[in-house]
Amino acid sequence: MSKLRCHHCGKPIDAQDATCPHCGIPLPPAKALTPHRKFILWFVALVIFCLALIYWLPPDWTGL
């Protein structure tokens, strides 16, 4: 458990707290892998996968 300081009152808080236990101000959420960041990572992986398939499976132009 890491100890941090509240930006509003300056007293120590835990990293897992949602609000400061001393002054009650809401604290910002943890910035680990939020659902938004997970979505971005999956989207980038999907785009890279699609580009690899486009490169690996070019269209068949011999039938023209």
Image: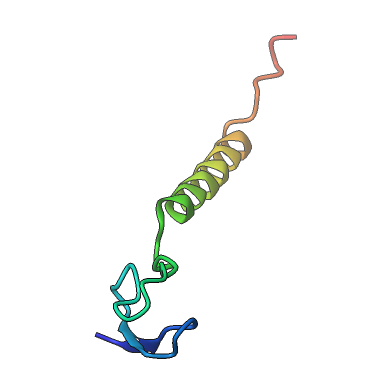
In the depicted view, which residue is nearer to us: 28 or 59? 28
46 vs 16, left or right, is right
User: Which residue lies at the image location 30% right of the left edge and 87% below the top edge?
Assistant: 2
User: Which residue lies at the image location 51% right of the left edge and 50% below the top edge?
Assistant: 40
User: Which residue lies at the image location 44% right of the left edge and 68% below the top edge?
Assistant: 28
Quadrant in the picture for the N terminus = bottom left
Question: Which picture quadrant has residue 25?
Answer: bottom left
In the depicted view, which residue is nearer to us: 18 or 47? 18
User: Which residue lies at the image location 47% right of the left edge and 51% below the top edge?
Assistant: 36
In the depicted view, which residue is nearer to us: 49 or 32? 32
Quadrant in the picture for the C terminus = top right
The answer to whether residue 9 is above or below residue 60 is below
**Extreme residue in the top direction:** 64
The picture places residue 47, in percent across and down from the top left corner, at 57, 42
The answer to whether residue 49 is above or below residue 54 is below
The picture places residue 58, in percent across and down from the top left corner, at 64, 30
The answer to whether residue 33 is above or below residue 9 is above
The picture places residue 16, in percent across and down from the top left corner, at 28, 73
In the depicted view, which residue is nearer to us: 50 or 24? 24
Question: Which picture quadrant has residue 14?
Answer: bottom left
51 vs 36, left or right, is right
Question: Which picture quadrant has residue 26?
Answer: bottom left
Disc tally is 0
The picture places residue 5, in percent across and down from the top left corner, at 41, 88
